[in-house]
Image (cartoon, rainbow, N blue to C red):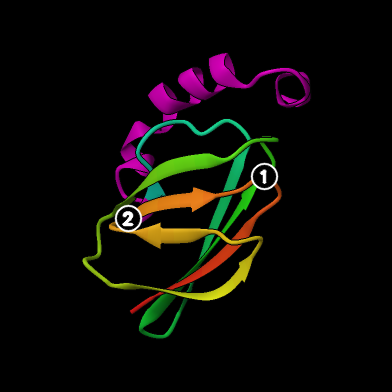
Amino acid sequence: GMGARRVDNKLLSEFLLKEILPIENQQLFRFKEQQKGLMMRTMHSGKSYITIVINKSGKMANATLLNKTGLKSTIIYNENGGKITSNVIILPSEGVLVIEWK
């Protein structure tokens, strides 16, 4: 667990993907593929969702989000010039996006 996080979590991610695939398929928002160095958390409040994405990869990141809700995205906080277009996040190193889905 912790050793994988410090080095490379690809093998741990592949194992967990097999173990939690039924749960993963229920996730409303997730990356299309594993994104090394990107962290994402989603919270639900009322009729909307808030997703926070942080880029700790050390380089520019482009990541496709899967959105199973059909809700539209609005950036409510942007640090370091990130953006989201057609469910593709473009986020510079150390960038932070807070996205509201309504």
Q: Residue furthest bottom?
A: 46
Q: What residue type is labelled 2?
A: Asn
Q: Do the residues labelled 2 and 1 touch (CB within 8 Å)?
A: no
Q: Residue furthest left?
A: 70
Q: Around disc 2, counting alpha carbons within 10 Å, would you say few (fewer than 14), some (14 to 19), or many (20 or more)?
A: some
Q: Around disc 1, counting alpha carbons within 10 Å, would you say few (fewer than 14), some (14 to 19), or many (20 or more)?
A: some
Q: What residue type is labelled 1?
A: Ser
Would you name the residue on which mark 1 appears?
93
- Which secondary structure lies at badge 1? loop
Q: Residue furthest front?
A: 81
The x, y position of residue 32, in whole percent, is 35, 38
Front label number (2 vs 1): 1
Does 20 sit above or below residue 8?
below
Using the image, tell me which numbered label, if any, was put on residue 63.
none
How far apart are the two marked residues, 2 and 1, measured between alpha carbons? 19 Å
Q: Is residue 79 magenta?
A: no
Q: Which of 3 and 72 is in front in this view?
A: 72
Q: Which of 86 and 41 is in front in this view?
A: 86
Would you name the residue on which mark 2 appears?
87
